[in-house]
Image (cartoon, grey):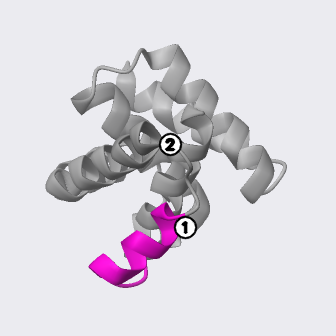
Amino acid sequence: MRREARECAFKLIFETLFKGTEEETQLEVIKPLKKDADKEFCKLIFDTYQIHREKLEYDVSTHLKNFDITRVYKIDLALVFMALTEIEFLDTPKPVAINEALEISKKYSTNDSSKFINGLLSAILS
């Protein structure tokens, strides 16, 4: 299922917000995915994020009002990066990518995170 692949990509992106992600770590995170297509999709999202990381950070930074990107809750930031990567570089429809990020936030983040993520994505994508 694509959600599992997205959760995998989210975890890898989240990890890079603290330190680099080594190939061995990537393999461990991807390993539980059962289908090769899901493993490839996870890797595609993550690799695309890595390539465009500076642009994504710039986009987020310029749309935060009176707030520095370093102060954004890292889980929320990783979900925003994941959604933006899919929308901007992988041609995933906006509603799909946003909905998936919001659903994953319900599992991993705070009750208010979905509002923040949705608002930030709307500001960036408008």
Residue located beneath label 1 in the image: 74
Query: How many numbered discs, if any?
Result: 2
> Is 99 located above or below residue 39 in the figure?
above
Q: Is residue 126 magenta?
A: no
Between the residue at mark 2 and the residue at mark 1, the CA separation in whole angstroms equals 28 Å
Question: Label 2's element?
Answer: loop
Q: Nearer the viewer, residue 125 or 104?
A: 104
Q: Nearer the viewer, residue 54 or 85?
A: 85
Q: In the drawing, does residue 8 fall left or right of residue 115?
A: left
> Is 125 located above or below residue 60 in the figure?
above
Residue located beneath label 2 in the image: 35
Tag nearer the camera, 2 or 1 = 2
Q: Residue at x 24, y 54 (%)?
A: 47
Residue 79 position within the rendered picture, expressed as x and y whole percent measured from the top left? 53, 49
Q: Residue at x 37, y 40 (%)?
A: 41
Q: Is residue 24 magenta?
A: yes
- Of the residues shown, which amino acid type is indicated by label 1? Lys
Q: In the drawing, does residue 118 fall left or right of residue 65?
A: right
Q: In the drawing, does residue 30 fall left or right of residue 102?
A: left
Residue 12 picture quarter: bottom left
Question: Label 1's element?
Answer: helix
> Is 9 located above or below residue 36 in the figure?
below
Residue 83 position within the rendered picture, expressed as x and y whole percent measured from the top left? 45, 37
> Is 114 located above or below residue 21 in the figure?
above
- Of the residues shown, which amino acid type is indicated by label 2? Lys
Placement of the N terminus among the 4 image quadrants: top right
Where are the magenta residues, as a range?
Answer: 17-31
Query: Tag 1 or tag 2, which sits nearer the N-term?
Result: 2
